[in-house]
Image (cartoon, rainbow, N blue to C red):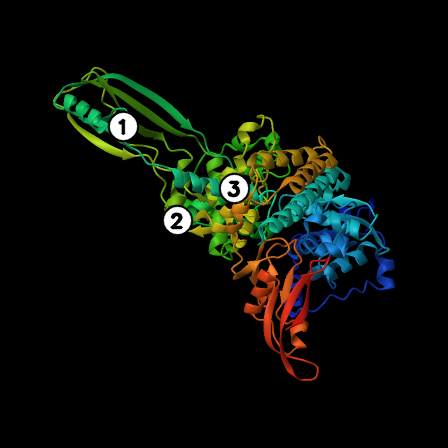
Amino acid sequence: MRYFTDSPFERLMMDVPHGHSLAAEAAWHHEQQATGKPAAFSLSSKSERRSSLNSTLIIAEKPSVALAIAAVVGAANRKNGYLEGNGYLVSWCVGHLVSLAQPENYDLRLARWRRADLPILPDPWQYVPNEKTKKQLELLNALMNRPDIETVVCATDAGREGELIFRLVYDYCHCSKPVKRLWTSSLEEGAIREGMAHLKDAAEYDLLSEAALCRAKADWLVGINLTRLYTLLYGPTLSIGRVMTPTLAMIVEREKAIADFTPKLFYTVHLLCSCEAASERFEDEQEAQALADACNGQTAEIIRVEKKTRSDHPPKLYDLTTLQREANQLFGYTAQQTLDCAQSLYEKKLTTYPRTDSRFLTRDMASMLPDLAQAVAALLPFEQGLSLPIHAEQVINDAGVSDHHAIIPTQSVTAERLDTLTNEELNIFNMLAVRLLCAVGEPHVIEERTLTLFCAGHTFTATGKTDTALGWRIPESTFYGSIGHPREPDAQAGVDPALCEHQRFFGVRTVVKKGLTTPPKRYTEATLLAAMENAGAERFPDEAERKGIGTPATRAGIIEKLVKGGFIERRGEKIKQLLPTDKGRNLIAVLPETLRSPLLTAQWENQLRQVEHGNLASDDFLSSIETMIRDQVDHAQANPQALTLFPTGRRKVAKCPCCGYPVSEAEKGYFCENRECNFGLFKDNKFFAVRGKKLDAATAVALLNDGKAAVKGMIAKSGKKYDGTVVMELDESVRPCLRVVLG
């Protein structure tokens, strides 16, 4: 066949059979991982290279994604660490292959934590390979620089983090070949084909990459400098994070509000007739009882009837944060568990890209929605026989979609494929499927009635609601019922529709009911995610694109870091509450408002978005971070009263003769707890060893307190024993020097 194009992908569209599978390659990859055999980095033979000139290298983020792409482009030949065929090579990263270097990579002296070395502000920044995945980086370097590779396609996850993963590898390998970008929200074959047919120029994503690198540098600057600073001030390692610390502060402040809350009693008077009507609240029980007595047995009249019809519009589709919140409420899943399930469903081609902050779809997707909704409904056992109108326009909003649209099921879903899911994955899929049916459904219509009654000179109110059209509530209620989690009905009894104005009730009865004000509720992952999403929102203009702290992609990881770091704990049954530990409370207690403030962090997040849109230079953003760090390093001082908040767990034996901090006994000796102080006495001490003695606790305490200690039974070179006084003096480097005084 003669081709009228130089594009290998367009040739592929003519030649490759539809639905080609790479199950064998997947099995090979898993076997390679299981055996731990290193990849051999030998490239194709000369003859192979001659027959495959002008090849294209596609780099995915994960092996599973690479296999999906390889199946579409016809790269069916298995190699060590990549697949090749039809003019394409397809390989993958394994997470971050290249990262920002640690301080000791710049200067070995920075391996030791000293305040005098702060702040650490790299210029220029350095990057290092991840040792665990270095072999895959070597492979990609070899592939990128292979003579026959003409173009490189970035096919990492279509988001800020995926862009950064690829760019760091590309730059580290000193590759200069042209780069195209595969940007897709689905791993379905059709979506990949469409994306490959319309590859973007990589330059279109330069600002996205710049914002991602800017975020990574900001997190490095804050984490490295302020963790070291406050650890040096207070002793134990105190991890400080740009987003993590303000999140912890919100949890600590909520717990303080609960502890400080004083419940108050209140009283309401209720008229009992054909409806139950309540008075306003009374703080004084006697006042409430007096009203009840005055109304008891009297006549009450309806003086006003208000009717209002309210349409509850269908809910929006899920973005990641909303999905995480509701999965926590329904199933008790952590944010990380939900993200893991959503990512797995995406890689299995059952749902679209999960790390999105949009709850809408684009105009070009409207035509497929009716068929998708009907197909999804047919797959759900609890929705069988359901027939609902489809209003696709309700979920279409091009302006509401930034990098990716809302999370929805794909057209690749079948009953057989659902059977392979774990219970957790199936629950998340069902949530996404039901939400699609709800979002394109009819409004839920409610009639609200409010009655105002007059009795003994006071007014009382009774309310009631009646469903007039369930609409989108039908698929939602059937799903909730199927998981044993029925929704609270919006309709409420209490007002007979037949009741009307001027109707009277004779001999009404009254009752006084007691109530108690309640404290704020502890955070769950659902409510914490909402708080993170909305932090500082009131201080931003309505047109601000992103508010809050963290991003949909990072919030789950932040919560997990707080748990693993011992700053918060999960407590409770199914829906776990998040409580600060003593370590978390103490950390927030010693930090200034600047580092605790969710508002400041929300401002930083908004500025990063401006960097992404080209409205703010990354250097200007990082400069503001550096200014804050310098201010902290210059002015932060330890609060002496707070030193007791961070016990080392070791026995304190004396004060340091150099700086006055406590000296505690460790396994190998007696050391000052001030990390900036170099003082220490080792138990395995050569001075005592050559004299046939070992430094014991009593001798160490005497040396520390008095600068000298009486030691009996020392052995001279001649072998004779003698008694003497060991005197300790400090040299210029605060190193203890010992000598013996006889007599």
Query: Residue 629: x percent and y percent?
Result: 67, 41
As drawn, is 312 to the left or to the right of 503?
right
**What is the secondary structure assignment of the residue under circle 1?**
loop
Say which residue label 2 marks.
483
For the residue labelled by badge 2, is the local secondary structure a helix, a strand or a loop? Answer: loop
Query: Where residue 259 sits in the image (x, y, percent)?
Result: 39, 41
Residue depicted at 42% across the width and 38% down the height: 257
Residue 591 at x, y percent in the picture = 56, 42
Of the 4 image quadrants, the one containing the C terminus is bottom right
Mark 2 vs 3, N-terminal side: 3
Packing grade of label 2 (10 A; few <14, some 14-19, many >=20) is few
- The image quadrant of residue 683 is bottom right
Inspect the image, locate mark 2, and give the three-letter code of the amino acid beneath it.
Answer: Ile
Camera-side residue of 27 and 266: 266
Residue at point 18%, 30% (across, down): 511
- Number of numbered tags placed on the structure image: 3
- Residue 429, visible in the rendered structure: no
Residue toward you, 358 or 190: 358
| Residue 263 in the figure: left or right of residue 535 | left
Q: Amino acid at mark 1?
A: Glu
Res. 670 in view: yes
Q: Residues within 10 Å of mark 3 (few under 14, many from 20)?
A: many
Q: Are the residues at dot 2 and dot 3 in contact (C-beta closer than 8 Å)? A: no
Residue that label 1 marks: 283
Q: Amino acid at mark 3?
A: Ala
How far apart in space, not on screen, are marks 1 and 2 (Cα)? Answer: 42 Å
